[in-house]
Image (spheres, rainbow, N blue to C red):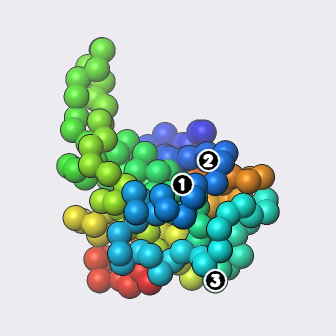
Amino acid sequence: MARAAGPGLPLGCDLELRPLPRAAARLVLREDEEGLLVDRDEPFHAGSRPTGAGWTVTELFSAKEAAWKALAGTGLGPPCLGEAGEEPQGLRRARPTGSLRDLRVGPTEDGLCVVRLRADPARAVRVRVVRVGTGVFGYVLGPSPGLGPSAALI
């Protein structure tokens, strides 16, 4: 993964090679996100997710995981996602704490999703999830501009 240099530019991706069972939803989602799930189990076909279709547990997990990495690794990172620590040569690195349930995912009008920090909804990133074989690849496209704390996600 690569991106142009610059502060505050989120970078995060996640590759899930195997589908997660629906029972794993309780580890990733909160009650207010359960309406996003499709009523079918995996597996599914490779390619982009159809606009307006429900999401699988694997897709939602991958979106949150990619967002977690992006938010923890930039100036967008909230305190609950990382504590700065000293690294060799004075570099600072975020150490994620908490869980993916501390993030809230929701659809956008363009078929992508936005993932935001529950404790600070203004900290959000846009994520695309693409099906790859029986798995998925989720990657952050950038910060989610114009989506303030009062924006409806679902």
Q: Residue at x 61, y 45 (%)?
A: 15
Position of the C terminus by quadrant: bottom left
- Numbered tag placed on residue 128 in the rendering: none
Amino acid type for the residue under numbered disc 3:
Gly
> For the point 65% across and 74% down, which residue is it?
40
Is residue 28 visible in this depiction of the protein? yes
On-image quarter of the N terminus: top right
Residue 41 percent location from the top left of the image: 65, 68
**In the image, residue 151 above or below residue 94:** below
Q: Answer yes or no: do the residues labelled 2 and 1 have beta carbons within 8 Å?
A: yes
User: Which of the numbered marks, if any, corresponds to residue 52?
Assistant: 3
Label 3 vs 2, first from the N-terminus: 2
Q: Secondary structure at mark 3?
A: loop
How many residues crowd mark 3 within 10 Å: few (<14), some (14–19), many (20+)? Answer: few
Mark 1 crowdedness (10 Å alpha carbons): few <14, some 14-19, many ≥20: many
* 3D distance between C-alphas at marks 3 and 2: 22 Å
Q: Earlier in the sequence, mark 2 or mark 1?
A: 2
Give the label, 3 or 2, closer to the camera.
2
Q: Residue 55 location, x and y as percent?
A: 59, 71
* Residue 152 in which image quadrant: bottom left
The residue identified by callout 1 is 62
What residue is shown at x 22% (from left), y 64% (from top)?
119
Q: CA distance from mark 1 to mark 3?
A: 18 Å
Reading the image, the residue beneath label 2 is: 16
